[in-house]
Image (cartoon, rainbow, N blue to C red):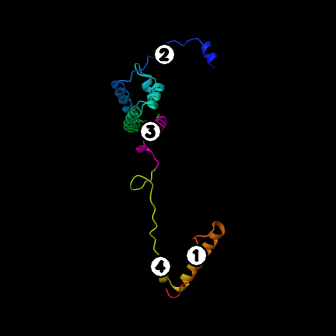
Amino acid sequence: MSEARELQKPRGPGRPKTEWSEDLVNEICDHLATGKSLIDIGRLQGYPSSDTMYRQMARDPEFAARIARGREAGQDHEADAIIQMADMASNEDWQVVKLRIWARQWRAAKLNSKYSDKVRHVGADGGAIQLEDKTAFDARNLPPEQREALRLILASAVAQHVETQGPVLEGDYSVTEDDDA
């Protein structure tokens, strides 16, 4: 493969090496905040290509975080623009406008969970949801015929569990009816 590269003619000068100044990064983020994509920005004169910006994001976590914040602001801008697009739609172009709105909504949902239709369920601390069974049941308060029906249901469930998955508890156990209770 290296021989094939050597045989190719040189491609000519590309873009100059990017100097990642604070001003350049601020300008990129400003463009993102107005709804432009990295591809749009990369096509502008004086800006690095989108490929270069993606490589820089992979190398520099701080730059990637700033780009993420710029994109988030851009999605807020796009949400405002969607309303304007919908208001300006006519009977002739409503389907085109609908497609443009859908595309922007899809992109916003992918880039910012604030605009996503997905519901995220989390616990009180932001972590996993903790489930706690607080069901209390005193079978002694049931009439005798309901206690017998419950005993049969539980005995059947325990027998089925033992057949398929083994003992429910370690050691000996049995289901009995306590007449004294």
Residue furthest out toward the bottom: 180
Image location of residue 68, percent across then percent down: 40, 36
Q: Label 1: which residue? A: 154
Q: Earlier in the sequence, mark 2 or mark 1?
A: 2
Looking at the image, is mark 2 or mark 3 earlier in the sequence? 2
Q: Amino acid at mark 2?
A: Gly
Closer to viewer: mark 2 or mark 3: 2
- Determine the main secondary structure of the stretch shown in magenta: helix
Q: Position of residue 86 (x, y in %)?
A: 41, 38
Marks 2/3: CA–CA distance: 31 Å
Label 1 sits on a secondary structure element that is helix
The answer to which of 24 and 96 lies nearer the viewer is 24
Q: Secondary structure at mark 3?
A: helix
Earlier-in-chain disc, 4 versus 2: 2
Q: Residues within 10 Å of mark 3 (few under 14, many from 20)?
A: some
Mark 3 against mark 1, which lies toward the viewer? 1
Q: Residue at x 48, y 16 (%)?
A: 14
Say which of 75 and 167 sits in front: 167
On residue 111, the disc is 3
Q: For the N terminus, which image quadrant?
A: top right
In the rendered structure, which segment of residues is drawn in magenta?
A: 95-118
**Which residue lies under the disc numbered 4?**
138
